[in-house]
Image: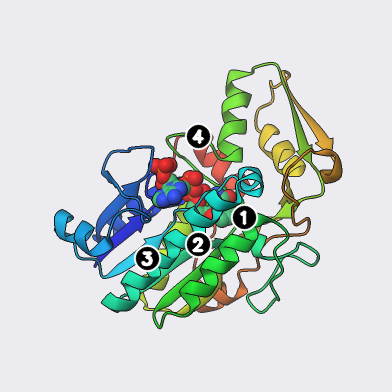
Amino acid sequence: MNIFVVGASGLVGSHCMRVFHNNDWLTLGTHLNYSTSGTVHFDPLVDDLQDFFSAQNFFPDAIVHCAALTNVDFCEHNVDDSYNATVLSTAKIVEFCKAADIPLAYISTDYVFDGKQGPYSERASVNPVNVYGSHKLEAEELVSLLEKKLILRITNVYGEELRSKNFIARLMDDLVQQPEKVLNLPYDQFATPIYAGDIAEMIFLLLRDRKNGLYHLGSSDYYSRYHLAVKVSSYFEKNKSVKLNPVQTINANQAAVRPLNGGLLNHKFINEYPKFQLTNVDSYILKSLKNEL
Ligand SMILES: NC(=O)c1ccc[n+]([C@@H]2O[C@H](COP(=O)([O-])OP(=O)(O)OC[C@H]3O[C@@H](n4cnc5c(N)ncnc54)[C@H](OP(=O)(O)O)[C@@H]3O)[C@@H](O)[C@H]2O)c1
């Protein structure tokens, strides 16, 4: 299978590249501003997909679209940038997939919900409370018009990444390097943090088995940012310099409104793949500390 991964220089995309490659799929992955080994520059708003694939001599059997402007507070103040990066870009990719009659796996978020009653199943009603969530939902709606599609909602992703920019990776770096620091962390924003490697394996299975429709890729963990940080730091006994300060969301000075009781229930996926072994935060940290990832 030939797979085109849009946003392969990012956290989820880079794990998709690794997992697909390990399963003997031929991959072509893209970056926008951060070139990584094995990715090519691609801007869905500028590049014509047909011309791009001809130039690359790569003809995909499916596309995994992991690209988005993911800074939720930036999106709140830069509505046009968010719309272009998330909605217009996706529209271009949807158009190509429709004409080529190939499946599109689109990565979305639990921010399509308002956070009043999470964690959420696929049957729950959407109601985004910020710009990022609204634009992800608009993109989902475009993808849902395709005959062959996967809409895969995820949240609070962690894992190894070149830029170490996800919350757990950054915190672990701090806990090793021990800078004097106070982290103000909301104790009332809950989600189901998930390992990027698990997401990639789940996407592999769903594409391999030609599944169609909406799936929530949740984990078995349910943490607030503060409780997650306490859990991670408990593995670093000597930590004295990084102070974890619990704050209430309304005092956290975040530009975008946050869903408080977020998170995703994975029952649909696990019913279809009962043998799938999800990583949890404990097992991830233990493996990471033993260099077993
Ligand atoms: N991480 C999470 O906790 C989380 C939670 C819920 C949903 N998601 C969704 O999961 C997907 C993957 O997230 P991630 O954490 O892997 O993000 P990430 O690490 O920030 O990576 C985003 C990727 O998209 C590319 N990109 C950004 N803007 C683009 C644009 N306008 N056109 C083309 N490419 C663009 C980036 O390229 P460069 O870096 O090379 O510029 C990068 O390859 C996103 O759709 C995100 O909304 C993530």
- Of labels 2 and 3, earlier in sequence is 2
Residue assigned mark 1: 132
Of tags 3 and 4, the one toward the viewer is 3
Residue assigned mark 4: 164
SS label for mark 3: helix
Q: Residue at x 53, y 70 (%)?
A: 140
Cβ of mark 4 under 8 Å from ligand 1: the answer is no
Q: Position of residue 106 (x, y in %)?
A: 46, 65
- Of labels 2 and 4, earlier in sequence is 2
Q: Cα distance, mark 2 to mark 1? A: 10 Å
Residue assigned mark 3: 93
Q: Nearer the viewer, residue 208 or 256?
A: 256
* Quadrant of image for the N terminus: bottom left
| Label 4 CA crowd tier, 10 Å (few <14, some 14–19, many 20+) | some
- Of labels 3 and 4, earlier in sequence is 3
Residue assigned mark 2: 87
Q: Residue at x 76, y 62 (%)?
A: 115
Cβ of mark 1 under 8 Å from ligand 1: the answer is yes
Query: Residue 218: in sight, yes or no?
Result: no
Query: Residue 99: in sight, yes or no?
Result: yes
Q: Amino acid at mark 2?
A: Val
Q: Amino acid at mark 1?
A: Tyr
- State yes or no: discs 4 and 1 in contact (Cβ < 8 Å): no
Q: Cα distance, mark 3 to mark 1? A: 19 Å
Of tags 2 and 4, the one toward the viewer is 2
